[in-house]
Image: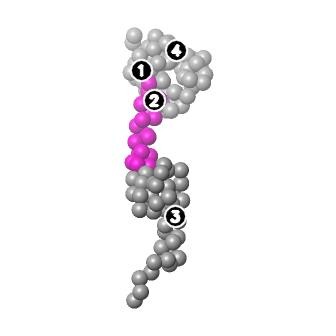
Amino acid sequence: MPRAVDGTRRKDHRKKILKLAKGYYGRRSTNHKTAKDAVAKALMYAYRDRRDKKPTFRALWITRINAACRAEGITYSRFIEGAAKIDLALDRKVLADIAVRDPEAFKAIVERVKTTVKA
């Protein structure tokens, strides 16, 4: 049986890889052999980093909440303790967004939390 060199499936597969490698530098975007390795690694990193993104954003939210709390004279841990006591239904993502976009509303939340915790 002759070896298929220019078959449609082979061409389509190469086209798919090169399309994914569009924008890569040098031979990585034009040469199938190097593009295949670059795309495989890029897809691996993308998969891994979709999972790594979650704790990274949580850390960012905590940092923003902490900075806003300290401006109001309370630490992050005390704020979270008080928020749990008053059954605050807002998660860290929303609290961080409020702290950045609406400082007055965040100040009101902090004042309500401060009434439940010791200094």
Q: Which residue is mark 1?
A: 76
Crowd band around label 4 with a 10 angstrom C-alpha radius: few (<14), some (14–19), many (20+): some
Tell me the residue at 61%/22% (across/down): 102
Q: Is residue 8 above or below residue 88?
A: below
Helix, strand or loop for disc 4: helix
The mark nearer the N terminus, 4 or 2, is 2
Q: CA distance from mark 3 to mark 2?
A: 37 Å
Q: CA distance from mark 3 to mark 4?
A: 57 Å
**What amino acid is found at the position of numbered circle 1 in the picture?**
Tyr
Tell me, yes or no, whether the highlighted magenta stretch contains residue 82: no
Helix, strand or loop for disc 1: helix
**What amino acid is found at the position of numbered circle 3 in the picture?**
Lys
Q: Which residue is mark 4?
A: 111
Q: Is residue 28 above or below residue 74?
A: below
The mark nearer the N terminus, 1 or 4, is 1
**What amino acid is found at the position of numbered circle 4 in the picture?**
Glu
Q: CA distance from mark 2 to mark 1?
A: 13 Å
